[in-house]
Image: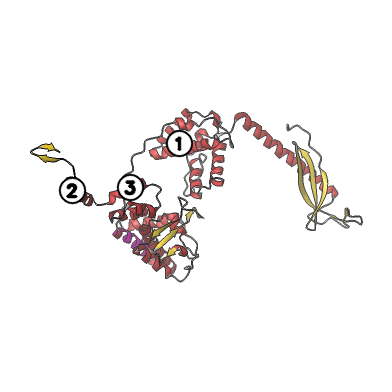
Amino acid sequence: MPPTDPVPTAALIVCEQRGEVHYEAKFRYGGHQVKRRIGRAWLSRDDVGGWRPRRGRVAGGYLDERRAHVAAAELVRTYVKDFNETERVERERRTRGVTFRELAHGYLHWLATVRGAKPSTIRSHQSDIAEPGTPHRRGTGTTAGLIMGALGDRPASKITPAEVEALLRTVAATGVSARSVNRAREIVCAAFNYGMKPTTYSLPTNPALGTDRRRVPEPGVLLFYSPEEIEAIARSLEAGFHRPAVLDRGELEQFEDDRDGEAVRVAAYSGLRLGELLALRWRDVDWTGSALTISRSLSSGVEGTTKTGHVRRVPMADQAAAALDRLSQRQDFTSPDDYVFCNALGRPLDGSALRRRYKRARDAAGLRPLRWHDLRHTFGSLLVAGGVDLVSIKDAMRHSQLTTTSRYLHARPATERAAAFTAAFSSSPSGGSTVEDGFSTR
């Protein structure tokens, strides 16, 4: 309906619900029958089952018939104004087509509500497609917003591979890694894949597919800590060396520092991801079976499934069991539903804050600047170095492919493999050739 159509007149309806009498406005506009509640009616039942005005002055919060007509007219005017504005925006959208900004936000909504992506994933994507000048979550900086700056206002159906490639060159010019450039390409590509669905915008093509992925260097050798270094970080936390003033620690601070030290040990000796560690509850600790049941993970403070969506049982080494046993000796929060790693109120820890404390303790101990996640790499690497087979490690770490686990093979001592090679070269296989006087015979 064009916005110049006349404003309709609403009919007043009296409605009684749960002992309350209300006026409602009923009218038709834009091909739709509309009914909206106006407010409580200053009415009472008459002798024949109808309605009549109550006696006395109209009380606050009630409407008599005259006031109800005025309120209904205002409601209709507001509805017509909003309806026409919505129609105008929709007509403009149909004329020019959906913009990349609308496409990207639709993709994020779909990712969260339909695909059930983890809150940390949504937050990361929101940062990727933030508007230029959006303040950072921490600090005083703002985001460059390169993706939205380049594509936000453009009709999605008119964006070309050349435009996306120009965006990627702009991202690369900021000095970020090839992986970061590819990340920008991937989110643009994902948004267009969503927009090509017949249930969304039926876009004809995905221009990001016509651009080149940047070559990412092969991952280097995974770095990991030795058991002595793990203990050094744990002791640094327990001693409060990460705090500005170690001597000012009280009972609460000591509780926190001891807990963080044990968190480092459990992470390194069980290979749990940070979110899995923070979601661990005492009922997940099987003391008799020497195993941890990992079925949940915390992401941005929200508890959900693990990264792979699977439940796994991780063998509990004595070193991890000892750390958990010490934690279980605390006075509070040791019932089955309590978090293993909690604050003084029993609530789960902030993963970002724990990582910051870990880094300060690591630096205070004078160790290599490995990340918290490298504690998980430490777990896999130490198992390989100790001769544990890759299949067992893959199962404990819940890798989807054995090739991922094989990255830890670098930790196996070269002397061990050299000895195996030597043994292979020292004997001739059955039916093989022999060497006599420089000639090969069979």
The answer to which quarter of the image holds residue 34 is top right
Label 2 CA crowd tier, 10 Å (few <14, some 14–19, many 20+): few
Residue where numbered disc 3 is placed: 407
In the picture, the disc for residue 133 is none
Q: Amino acid at mark 2?
A: Thr
Q: Position of residue 299 (x, y in %)?
A: 48, 53
- Kindly identify the amino acid type of the residue bearing the numbered disc 1: Arg
Judge from the rendering whether residue 438 lies leftward or rightward of residue 266; answer left or right: left
Tell me the residue that label 1 is attached to.
185
Q: Residues within 10 Å of mark 1 (few under 14, many from 20)?
A: many
SS assignment for the magenta stretch, majority: helix
- The mark nearer the N terminus, 2 or 3, is 3
Q: Considering the image in quadrants, where does the N terminus appear?
A: top right
| Tag 1 secondary structure | helix
Q: Residue furthest left?
A: 437
Residue type at mark 3: give it: Arg
What residue is pinned by disc 2? 422
Determine the CA span between mark 1 and mark 2. 48 Å
Stretch of the chain drawn in magenta: 228-242
Q: Are marks 1 and 3 in contact (CB under 8 Å)?
A: no
Residue 247 picture quarter: bottom left
- Relative depth, front residue between 216 and 132: 216
Between 223 and 127, the one nearer to me in the picture: 223
Closer to the chain start, of discs 1 and 3, is: 1
Question: Percent x, y for residue 359?
Answer: 37, 55
Tell me where residue 376 appears, x and y as whole percent. Answer: 37, 54
The verdict on residue 148 being magenta is no
Query: Which residue is rendered at x = 84% and y = 51% of the image?
Result: 64
